[in-house]
Image (cartoon, helix red, strand yellow):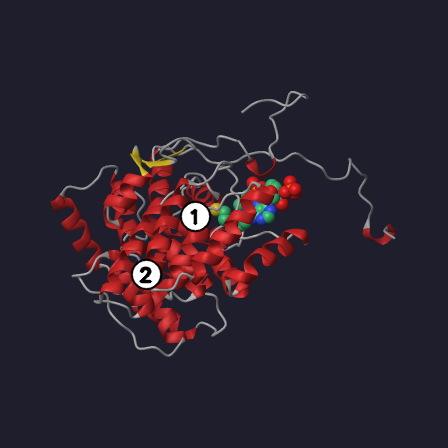
Amino acid sequence: MGEDKGGGPAYSPGLEGVIAGESALCEVDEGAAGLRYRGYAIGDLAEQATFEEVAYLLLFGKLPTRKELGDFTAQLQTQWPLPGSVEAFIGVVPPSAHPMDILRTGVSLLGMTDPDAADSPREASLRKSVRLLAQIPILIANAHRLAHAKRQVQPSPDQSFAENLLYLLTDRHADEQAKAMARVLNVSLILYAEHEFNAPTFAARVAASTLTDLHAAVTAAIAALKGPLHGGANEAVAAMLLEIKSRDRAERWVRDALAQKRRVMGFGHRVLHKGDARSAIIQRHAEALSRTCGDTRWYDIATIVDRIMQQEKGLYPNLDFYTAVAYLLMEIPRDLYTPVFVCSRIAGWCAHIIEQQDHNRLIRPRAAYVGPPPQAYVPLERRT
Ligand code: COA
């Protein structure tokens, strides 16, 4: 870290531009590949891999062989059933609770019932990670179904992670359209899986650096993901597209929003100023899925918003923007968009927590004091 003119450590609001640690998990660059997970270009992974392969890559450091993938998938399936205490918790949450809040508390509770709860060696952390990867989709789906008086359904061992997730959240499976949707969901899960030191990942690493347990660190990450400046943006984009309603209203809506100095969700990024390679990938898939579904309304509105934002503000869409178009077509309930992000990013978070545990140093930055100058203490009876 550099020094300021006074000789102290340099201050960067929001830690912008600060290198806060080392990681072998992903490389964010604005060059041709845009993003690499453990050296593999995001475009190659999104177009050719399954989410299960990518989760394995992040957690275990290499792409799995066919046998390793089979074992990993089987391991995930054995972890599907939720502990009774977590099912009981889902039964008593207030009806108004946001799924991200249910997830945050649910993951914390999973930590208390985890068979490796008391252990933190690498192997135990990996077992906990696999359990969370398997259980988070079930937790989200069961809570949603109970809250909306829908029948509970079970994932199938014959379906992929994305196919099961689509089924659990929307009841869709088997037909050609559902298969096309699951393929796009698979792509979006791969794109969401990891993005170095964003706020929730950093929160997880800060927590992990105190040697707390993996579930505690993931709980911190979920709390940090919820806000609309980050994970909540995909849900906010869908709300915006629904509010705009039709393509003929889109241009006016954006111009009014900008005139009122409102933030248009799904645009801008703290690190990526020349565009997000993931956005171009999900845009292509959202467009193709719109045609497959015979409904280009949301995509058409989105491209108009995109054009005006680039023209007027020089801001590019981030991953959340066209993802919202795809999720609207899939009819994923809107308040589950950010939880779906968690279903994927849990792989990246757990890999980061394990990496932090492997090379730990307590994360403890300094603050620049801006409060009152030194003052004399005034006893209570003499204070006015
Ligand atoms: N809509 C309108 N204006 C935006 C904007 C957006 N989505 N994102 C940034 N800007 C503008 C800001 O108003 C600011 O303009 P100003 O200098 O005239 O005041 C300028 O761009 C810089 O924004 P700033 O908030 O300082 O950048 P940041 O690096 O802190 O912000 C985000 C990054 C992601 C928080 C921000 O772009 C944002 O709020 N985007 C919308 C939420 C979103 O999509 N989040 C998901 C991120 S992956």
Seen at 80% across and 43% down, the residue is 377
Name the residue rendered at 39%, 49% in the picture: 283
Q: Residues within 10 Å of mark 2 (few under 14, many from 20)?
A: many
Q: CA distance from mark 1 to mark 2?
A: 21 Å
Neighbourhood count class around disc 1 (C-alpha, 10 Å): few under 14, some 14–19, many 20 upward: many
- Residue at the extreme bottom of the image, as rendered: 149
Q: Which mark is residue 369?
A: none
Residue 164: x, y in percent?
25, 62
Report the residue at 36% width, 59% height from top: 290
Type of amino acid under label 1? Leu
Front in this rendered view, residue 268 or 221: 268
Q: Where does the N terminus fall, quadrant-wise?
A: top right
Q: From this view, report whether residue 107 is shown above or below residue 368.
A: below
In-image side of 68 versus 306 (left or right): left
- Image coordinates of residue 136 in percent, x first then y, are 33, 59
Q: Secondary structure at mark 1?
A: helix
Query: Residue 137 has which mark?
Result: 2
Check disc 1 and report the residue beneath it. Answer: 319
Q: Residue at x 48, y 69 (%)?
A: 97
